[in-house]
Image (spheres, rainbow, N blue to C red):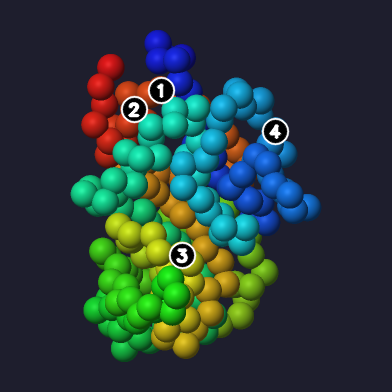
Amino acid sequence: MSTSPHRYFIINKPYNMVSQFISSHDVRLLGDLDFDFPEGTHAIGRLDNHSEGLLLLTTNKKVTRLLFDPKKNHERSYLVMVNRTVTPELLHQLKTGVSIKIKEGEEYTAVPTSIEMVEDVTTVYKHMDDVRQQYEHSWLLMTLTEGKFHQVRKMVQAINRRCQRLVRVSIGNLKLGDLKPGAVKEMQEKEFFELIGIEYKA
């Protein structure tokens, strides 16, 4: 598929699965997916156990350093299901920045690159069969260039709401698209690098 010795994959990580191949805990692992990953495959960044969506995997150890280079802003977009209605006033709070606690209780003002309400969630992500949608809720599409621990959930909590579902739908220009939960797609190195916004050198 590529002349590179490395391989590159995107997956739609399902709910209740950790972003690891090995764990000392009794949890669902990436190796439980129906795909034969080559030795040395690892996740680039993580989605926590209760988050879903786009996760990058590769055998190339350098990609993590390149993607998380603090000098470059790599956008990540998340579809967020929030309990109850998010009013225009609350949306404005999120847009202008909310205070969240990060390491050792330090206060941090988290400001999204962009945020908007989503009326028809299936235009962004089609795999949305969720019984909770019968109750009062709002959908937000939030884009960040930073990744503090549980940042999206903490931002929603800062406006006195609860994040009920969190799906990462894109990293840079690489989109989850119609990939089903648990599905794996292998990509060519050049396209993979270009879409996530890393300089490609053949």
Residue 77, above or below 138:
above
| Structural distance between the alpha carbons of marks 3 and 2 | 29 Å
| Structural distance between the alpha carbons of marks 4 and 2 | 24 Å
| Along the line of sight, the residue nearer the viewer: 105 or 92 | 105
Q: Position of residue 169 (x, y in %)?
A: 44, 52
| Structural distance between the alpha carbons of marks 1 and 2 | 6 Å
Q: Viewed as shown, does residue 127 lie left or right of 143?
A: right
Identify residue for label 3: 149
- Mark 4 and mark 1 lie on one chain; the one further toward the N terminus is 4
- The amino acid pointed to by label 4 is Asp
Label drawn at residue 191? 2
Identify residue for label 1: 188
Q: Nearer the viewer, mark 1 or mark 3?
A: 3
Could you classify mark 3 by the number of other residues whose Cα lies within 10 Å: few (under 14), some (14-19), or many (20 or more)?
few
Identify residue for label 4: 34
- Mark 3 and mark 4 lie on one chain; the one further toward the N terminus is 4
Picture mark count: 4
Q: Position of residue 20 (x, y in %)?
A: 61, 44
Question: At 73% across and 49% down in the image, what residue appears?
Answer: 24
Quadrant of the rendering where the C terminus is positioned? top left
Residue 3, above or below 8:
above
Q: Position of residue 196 (x, y in %)?
A: 33, 39
| Structural distance between the alpha carbons of marks 3 and 4 | 29 Å
Secondary structure state at the residue bearing disc 3: loop
- The amino acid pointed to by label 2 is Glu
Secondary structure state at the residue bearing disc 4: loop
Question: At 40% across and 44% down in the image, what residue appears?
Answer: 175
Secondary structure state at the residue bearing disc 2: helix
